[in-house]
Amino acid sequence: MTLKTFKAIGLAGALMIATAGATASAAPFVFRATGGGVAQTFADFQTAAGDPNNGNALGPIDDGRRQINWDAGIVPFNMPGLFFNEVVTRGAGFSIDNGADQFAVSNDGIDDKFNSFNPDYVNQFATFSAPRLFTPVNSNTVTVGFFVSGTEILAEVNAFGAVFTDVDLPNLTQMEFLDADGEVLLSEFVDVASGDLSFLGADFGEETFSFVRLTLGNAILGADDGNGQDVVVLDDLIYSEPQARAQVPEPATASLLLLGLGGLAFARRKKARMTPIS
């Protein structure tokens, strides 16, 4: 499947004008931590997302979880959006609202913590699993969608979490969980941890979602970090085993969904109430 096709029948659906729909019937459990608490909270979230870690096993698989740490030598500096479904088969695809769909993974021999974009970053970005980090290019937002691993079958999950690095300013870096129609089921800001790590994740229990939209600070990679600008990048991602959606858009609808790309704002946003846990 090409990235264009994926966006037409998948991620674009999260960016279209959403129709009214039901939100999750039960409040999700939210996991959050900063600094020295990230490792234990990440381990707790592994249990919530499911055992075992299914690695690169092809789907469908009934349970377990997937993780992405970017650190394998096979992951390229300029990473295609479908790399972690078509090459490394972990059932995840990435897209950018503005349609540019450029992603970078800091890569030994090319740069260190994106210092090829800005030499100051090497002293600003911490790592959870050294040495590599991930970011969209020319955008500070990225949307994650899911497949039955190694297939073209669109999927959904019930748990997703991410490690962020160098969140300097409050109420900017954000995680939004969306259903297949683009309804926002939960929206949460990531806790500040300047020069350190933050973790945010949510477990929806029996409920599922189709996309996660991440807003990283308020500045794109390459900008100076400070004086009101906050450059944030990502380390590890973790999510429950993607399961096939009950319904997917018909091909005739795909061209209409594609119109949702190019920065179309979410129209009807509904926030589910959450229950934070320590």
Image: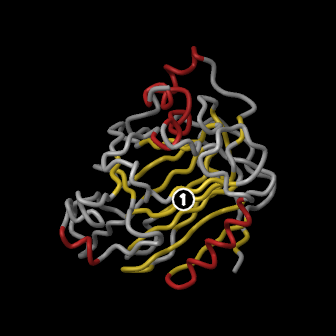
Residue 85 rendering spot, x and y as whole percentages: 53, 39
Q: Residue at x 52, y 34 (%)?
A: 16
- Would you say 94 lies left or right of 273 here? left
Query: In the image shown, does 220 or 118 lie closer to the viewer?
Result: 118
Callout 1 environment at 10 Å: few (<14), some (14 to 19), or many (20+)?
Answer: some
Q: Amino acid at mark 1?
A: Leu
At x 30%, y 66%, the residue is: 113
- Along the line of sight, the residue nearer the viewer: 59 or 123: 59
Tell me if 106 is positioned left or right of 118 in this view. Answer: right
The residue under label 1 is: 237
Count the marks: 1
Q: Quadrant of residue 27?
A: bottom right
Location of the C terminus (image quadrant): bottom right
Q: Residue furthest front?
A: 73
Q: Residue furthest bottom?
A: 36
State the scheme by which the image is colored: secondary structure
The residue most toward the top is 252
Where in the figure is residue 49, as x and y percent of width and height?
Answer: 71, 60
Percent of width and height locating residue 241: 69, 48
**Residue appearing at x 72%, y 37% in the figure:** 60
* Image position of 95 with respect to 39: above or below: above
Q: Quadrant of residue 118?
A: bottom left
Q: Residue at x 63, y 55 (%)?
A: 239
Where residue 160 sits, quadrant-wise, is bottom right
Does residue 108 appear left or right of residue 184 in this picture? left
Task: Please state the horizontal and vertical placement of residue 82, each as a whole percent of the image.
Answer: 46, 38
Of 230 and 89, the residue lying toward us: 89
